[in-house]
Image (cartoon, rainbow, N blue to C red):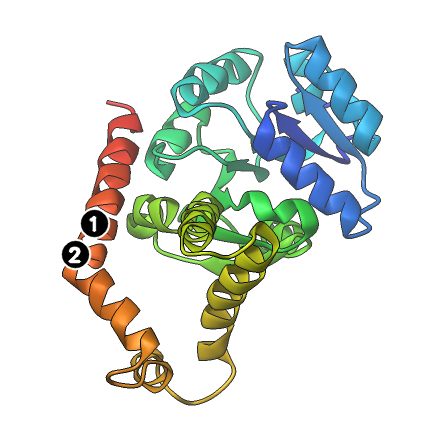
């Protein structure tokens, strides 16, 4: 199963999250050998040209070269892919693999590949592209200390890493997406334009509100609720805005959106 190299970080799947992770690794100065396996020649050409990765369309050869194997395909494709890998022969003991797929639990990954593989699940943010990512990790019970360290160190190169229980993974996947920050930014910019700001000023004002609001709780001892009360003087402009948001059931709308995402994540899980 293994070739003579066994020294590469191998991504099976050349989609968006692979592109973001490889970009972040290169941005952070990672000089290790990176191999991407994908059946689409165009994706491989693009990744090879942008990030100096090694492309490998042959699944067996790619897996044979893996020091660390990252499964970066759609959730529905994970278990069929692992069955194809397993059919080529048993993995050596203490092989380390990471699934980047939502909804596929560690127990299913373990069953698919047998006891020789030490598994982790990772959910990296697309912001890892610029080494500003946030990655949640959950490790299988059989993952050893050295394997855990190897996985954690890889993702630490592209941003912050937190370890969470696997039972929280779906909810984390719902809550962490930068798409929500971008949506909030775009919606508030549109609203600011409608009340009279130019595009440039609207962006500056709204970006300040969101970025500094997120930064403030980590820079002092005041609680989030305390900061919120401090920033919105009763009877003032900020308080009027917050009162209108509360009257419009803003928090309940966010919760409803999160629950919709959680339901979708659970539907992705293999039966």
Find residue 107 and name its label: none
Point out residue 139 in the picture as x, y percentages from the top left corner. Answer: 44, 49
Q: Which residue is drawn at 44% across and 55% down?
A: 192
**Considering the numbered disc 1 on the image, is that residue within a helix, a strand or a loop?**
helix
Using the image as rendered, state which of residue 68 and residue 194 is in the foreground: 194
Where is residue 217, by image quadrant? bottom left
Whether residue 209 sits left or right of residue 104 in the image: it is: right
Q: Which residue is drawn at 69% across and 21% down?
A: 62
Quadrant housing the C terminus: top left
Whether residue 92 sits left or right of residue 217 in the image: it is: right
- Asked if the residue at tag 1 contacts the one at tag 2, i.e. Cβ–Cβ closer than 8 Å, the answer is yes
**Considering the numbered disc 2 on the image, is that residue within a helix, a strand or a loop?**
loop
Vertical comparison of 149 with 265: above or below: below
Where is residue 92, by image quadrant? top right
Question: Residue 208: in sight, yes or no?
Answer: yes
Mark 1: few, some, or many residues within 10 Å (few <14, many ≥20)? few
Vertical comparison of 47 with 231: above or below: above
Using the image as rendered, state which of residue 218 and residue 75 is in the foreground: 218
Q: Residue at x 32, y 80 (%)?
A: 232
Whether residue 72 sits left or right of residue 169 in the image: it is: right
Point out residue 190 in the picture as x, y percentages from the top left corner. Answer: 44, 47
Mark 2 = which residue?
A: 249
Mark 1 = which residue?
A: 253
Mark 2: few, some, or many residues within 10 Å (few <14, many ≥20)? few
Whether residue 25 sits left or right of residue 204 in the image: it is: right
Q: Residue at x 78, y 48 (%)?
A: 27
Using the image as rendered, state which of residue 205 and residue 12 is in the foreground: 205
């Amino acid at each position: 199963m293994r070739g003579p190299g066994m020294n590469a970080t191998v991504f099976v799947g050349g989609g968006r999250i692979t592109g973001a992770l490889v970009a972040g690794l290169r941005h952070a100065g990672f000089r290790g050998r990176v191999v991407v396996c994908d059946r689409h020649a165009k994706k491989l050409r693009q990744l090879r040209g942008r990030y100096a990765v090694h492309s490998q369309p042959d699944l067996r050869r790619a897996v044979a070269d893996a020091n660390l194997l990252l499964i970066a395909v759609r959730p529905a494709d994970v278990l069929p892919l692992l069955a194809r890998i397993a059919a080529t022969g048993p993995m050596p003991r203490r092989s380390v693999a990471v699934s980047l797929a939502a909804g596929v639990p560690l127990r299913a990954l373990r069953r698919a590949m047998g006891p020789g593989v030490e598994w982790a699940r990772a959910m990296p943010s697309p912001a890892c592209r610029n080494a500003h990512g946030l990655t949640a990790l959950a490790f299988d019970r059989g993952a050893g200390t050295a394997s855990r360290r190897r996985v954690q160190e890889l993702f630490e190169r592209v941003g912050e890493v937190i370890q969470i229980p696997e039972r929280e993974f779906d909810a984390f996947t719902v809550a962490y997406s930068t798409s929500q920050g971008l949506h909030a930014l775009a919606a508030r910019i549109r609203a600011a334009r409608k009340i009279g700001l130019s595009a440039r000023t609207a962006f500056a004002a709204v970006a300040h509100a969101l970025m500094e609001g997120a930064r403030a709780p980590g820079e002092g001892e005041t609680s989030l609720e305390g900061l919120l009360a401090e920033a919105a003087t009763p009877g003032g402009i900020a308080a009027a805005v917050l009162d209108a948001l509360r009257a419009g059931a803003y928090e309940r709308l966010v919760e409803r959106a999160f629950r919709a995402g959680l339901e979708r994540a659970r539907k992705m899980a293999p039966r």
